[in-house]
Image (tube, rainbow, N blue to C red):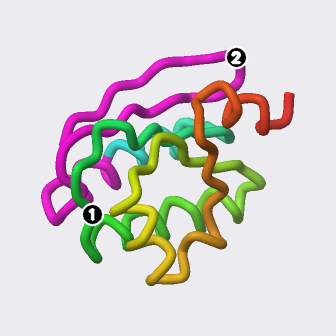
Amino acid sequence: MTISEERVGNVLVMGLGGKFDIEGGKSFLERATQILDGGEKHILLEFTGVTYINSTGLRALIIVGKRMGTTGGWLHLTGVNDQIRTVLKISGLNVLFAQYPSKAEALEAFPQ
């Protein structure tokens, strides 16, 4: 998995690419933990480049989402393709993570 980072106002945009599997989930969780340990409160996960997600990737999302919830943070998703959207829906995680069709719409949803 590739992870890029971009600061847009008070939001850290993490661009994800590749497979969100065992290795990708581990890489994401390690980097997200570093970011959260640094005090980040608003993260947008841009899934445009993600081609696959499995239970390990879902677990990593849950861990990061729960941790952000306990600190008053916000985690939004954008660029989720139909296949991953289906996986999120089947797993029931579609109700835990706000999903937006575009990066601009997602960024507008964060508190200022």
Q: Where is residue 45 drawn, in percent x and y?
A: 49, 42
If the image is split into quadrants, where does the N terminus sit? top left
Disc 1 packing (10 Å; few <14; some 14–19; many ≥20):
some
Q: Is residue 2 visible?
A: yes
Mark 2 vs mark 1, CA separation in Å: 29 Å
As drawn, 14 above or below 67: above
* Residue mark closest to the camera, 2 vs 1: 1
Residue kind at label 1, given as amino acid type: Ile
Q: Secondary structure at mark 2?
A: loop
Disc 2 packing (10 Å; few <14; some 14–19; many ≥20):
few
**Labels 2 and 1 touching (C-beta < 8 A):** no
Q: Which residue is mark 2?
A: 9
Seen from the viewer's position, the closer of residues 94 and 86 is 86
The residue shown at (41%, 24%) is 5
Task: Residue at the far left: name it.
Answer: 23
As drawn, 61 above or below 35: below
The residue shown at (26%, 59%) is 25
If the image is split into quadrants, where does the C terminus sit? top right
39 to the left or right of 34: right
Q: Is residue 18 magenta?
A: yes
Magenta residue span: 1-30
Q: Secondary structure at mark 1?
A: strand
Q: Where is residue 9 drawn, in percent x and y?
A: 70, 16
35 to the left or right of 56: right
Q: Which residue is mark 1?
A: 53
Seen from the viewer's position, the closer of residues 90 and 65 is 90
